Amino acid sequence: MLEKQPKLIPSLKAAFKNRPFIFGAGIYLLTWMTIVVLETNLLIYIKYILGRQGQSSLIMASIFVTAIFALPIWNWAAKHWNKRLAYIIGVSFWAVVMIVLIMVTPQTPFWIIMVCASWLVSASAPHRYCPGPSFLTQSNGMNG
């Protein structure tokens, strides 16, 4: 027998009454919005604030290469550590990198800018693996 599908309004009411789900969904959505805004504005930051328009392609290439190596590392961390711990470590690392990037000036050596920009992307990688849908189902009391 087929189960009857719940109606939209009662389903939304049930979801909004579930505080752990709302908390997890809020973290997930706000984290992704922050990452997208920062990734979008990174090129503008490099180009206009740091005045390194000619080196922006090289910086973006280093970010891409770093992400290729960082994603499997964070995937391993999320699988072998507690996902919550991996997420906290990743967010902490990301915050430190953001603080360092705030202090970068146009006079900063190029290699420091490349390292910081690359670390920024590698630090944002836990958001891709740790909290995701399984984070929401765990906060909902289900195994995931």
Image (spheres, rainbow, N blue to C red):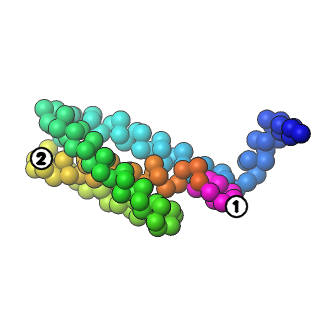
Which numbered circle lies on residue 141?
A: 1
The answer to whether residue 133 is visible is yes
**Mark 1 surroundings within 10 Å by alpha-carbon count, few (fewer than 14), some (14 through 19), many (20 or more):** few
The amino acid sitting under disc 1 is: Gly
Label 1 vs 2, first from the N-terminus:
2
Between residues 97 and 49, which one lies in front from this camera angle? 97
* Image quadrant containing the N terminus: top right
At 54% across and 45% down in the image, what residue appears?
A: 29
> x, y percentage for residue 83?
50, 62
> x, y percentage for residue 59?
20, 41
At 23% across and 52% down in the image, what residue appears?
A: 116
At 42% across and 55% down in the image, what residue appears?
A: 75
Q: Is residue 127 magenta?
A: no
Q: Of all residues shown, which one is farthest toward the right?
A: 1
Kindly indicate whether the residue at mark 2 contacts the one at mark 1 (C-beta within 8 angstroms). no
**Which residue is disc 2 drawn over?**
110
Between residues 115 and 97, which one lies in front from this camera angle? 115
Between residues 64 and 37, which one lies in front from this camera angle? 64
Compared to residue 39, the image places residue 25 above or below, namely below
* 126 displayed left or right of 49: right
The amino acid sitting under disc 2 is: Phe
The answer to whether residue 98 is visible is no
